[in-house]
Image (cartoon, helix red, strand yellow):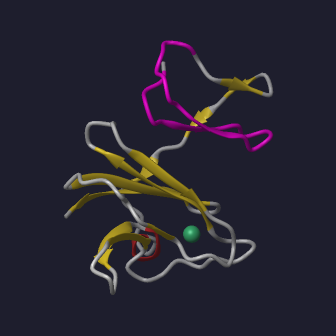
Amino acid sequence: MTELNELYRCNICGNIVEVVGNSYGELVCCNEPMEKIESKVQEDGLFEKHLPVLIHDEDDKYLIRVGSSEHPMEEKHYIMFIEAISKDNKYLKRVFLNPGERPELYPDCKCNHLNARELCNIHGLFESELNK
Ligand SMILES: [Fe+2]
């Protein structure tokens, strides 16, 4: 059984997929069930660099940045992507990132409440609710 927006990883080949249509079937890759990637809820010492935060930039635009203390964007340790999803699931914006880029996303929807999440290649998935 899958739910909209869930993320799954293949622990053999490393494929990562996101559900865009939920159903009762099991996701399989490399002949093995894929593992659901759960958002981190409580991990001392990791939140500061991983939880998405909402800030105003110098042009007074809303900006989602990963970590109140900026996360590293190095070859071996970086943020793979950031997503902003509205509460009603009508809006989704995702930015894929490479080492060396800033871990930021500009949400361009008018919604006042967003779920933001990011995937760190080492520490996993972190999610936060953001209110304008
Ligand atoms: Fe990390």
| Left or right: 126 as drawn, with respect to 88 | right
> Among all residues in the image, which is located at the extreme bottom?
58
Q: How many marks?
A: 0
Residue 102 percent across, percent down from the top left: 56, 77
> Among all residues in the image, which is located at the extreme front?
59
Residue 85 percent across, percent down from the top left: 36, 47
User: Is-magenta flag for residue 14?
Assistant: yes
Q: Where, quadrant-wise, is the C terminus in this rendering?
A: bottom left
Which quadrant holds residue 25?
top right
User: Is-magenta flag for residue 22?
Assistant: yes
Of 9 and 17, the residue lying toward us = 17
Main SS of the magenta segment? loop
Of 89 and 25, the residue lying toward us = 89
| Left or right: 120 as drawn, with respect to 104 | right
Which quadrant holds residue 96?
bottom right
Residue 11 percent across, percent down from the top left: 72, 40
Residue at left offset 33%, top offset 37%: 89
Residue at left offset 23%, top offset 52%: 111
Residue 104 percent across, percent down from the top left: 48, 71
Residue at left offset 62%, top offset 64%: 97
Query: What range of the chain is rendered magenta?
Result: 2-25
| Left or right: 87 as drawn, with respect to 80 | left
Quadrant holding ligand 1? Answer: bottom right
Q: Is residue 130 above or below residue 12?
A: below
| Left or right: 51 as drawn, with respect to 124 | left
Residue at left offset 53%, top offset 77%: 71
Q: Is residue 80 above or below residue 100?
A: above
